[in-house]
Image (cartoon, rainbow, N blue to C red):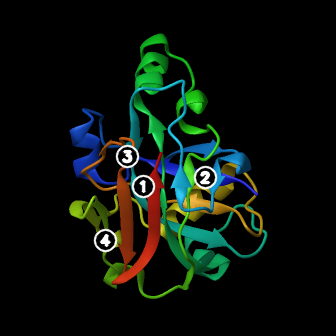
Amino acid sequence: MKIICIGRNYVEHAKELNNPVPTKPMFFVKPDTALLRTHMFYIPPFSNNIHYELELVVKIKKVGKSISKRFAHKYYDEISLGLDLTARDLQEECKEKGMPWEIAKGFDSSAPIGRWYQKKDLKSLDFYLLKNGEKVQEGNPSQMVFDVDSIIEYVSKFMTLKKGDLIFTGTPSGVGKMEVNDVFEAYLDGKKTIDLRVK
C-alpha cells in the first residue's frame, strides 16, 4: 500500500505558501508507515513546525495502469478525510537546497486517516477542520484545480495503482502549526471523520 499526495491542488493554498499553481498534477508519495489510525499524534523531536493540511482521500479498489479519465471513477468507491502532516521547517530547508521533501512529508504517523464512507457525488461534498473548536479549513472537491478522475489518470501513467492505495487529493487554504494539546476534528458531509489529539 502506498499513499499518494497531490500538492497545490487548491488555488488559495498555493497562494498562501507563495507557490505557483501547477499546470499538471504534482504528487509525492508517503510510505505506509506514515499512516496513523489512532486518535493521538505525538509531535516528533526533529521538527519545531509541524503543519496540518486537511484533505479528501480516496481509496483505490483494484489494480490499474494508464487509466483513462472516463474510467477512473470505477477504481474507487470509498472516501475519507486525512491530514497530510508536514514538517514545514524541514521542508523549507529541503527547498532551499533543492533536495526532495520526503523527510518533511513521509515521517512516521504523518498521515492520520479518518472513517471511510461510500463515495457520493464529490462535487456536493463539503468538508472542514476544527482546531480547538474553531474552524480553520474548509473546502469542496469542486474547488480542486485537478479533479479526482484527472488525478487518477495522471498518476497511473507513471505508477501502477493497487488495491488499498490511498490518494490524498490536496488541501484548501488555512493550514497552520500544530501545538501540544491541540484537538483537531474533521467533518465530511456533516459527519465527524477525524478526532485527533496532539501530544
Give the residue displayed 54% in from the left and 37% down from the top.
105
110 versus 143 height, above or below: above
Taking the image as shown, residue 90 lies to the left or right of residue 134, namely right
Q: Earlier in the sequence, mark 2 or mark 1?
A: 2
Q: Residues within 10 Å of mark 4 (few under 14, many from 20)?
A: many
Query: Looking at the picture, how far across and down is residue 118, in whole percent?
Result: 56, 87
Q: Residues within 10 Å of mark 3 (few under 14, many from 20)?
A: many
Secondary structure, mark 2, is strand
Query: Looking at the picture, how far across and down is residue 28, in whole percent?
Result: 58, 42
Please name whichever residue, 154 or 26, is drawn nearer the observer in this view of the structure: 26
Secondary structure, mark 1, is loop
Distance, label 4 to label 3, CA atoms, is 15 Å
As drawn, which residue projects farthest toward the top? 97
- Residue bearing mark 3: 8
> Which label sits on residue 170?
1
> Which label sits on residue 4?
2
* Circle 2/circle 4 CB separation < 8 Å: no
- Residue bearing mark 4: 140
Distance, label 4 to label 1, CA atoms, is 11 Å
The three-letter amino acid code for the residue at tag 2 is Ile
Query: Looking at the picture, how far across and down is residue 192, in whole percent?
Result: 41, 78
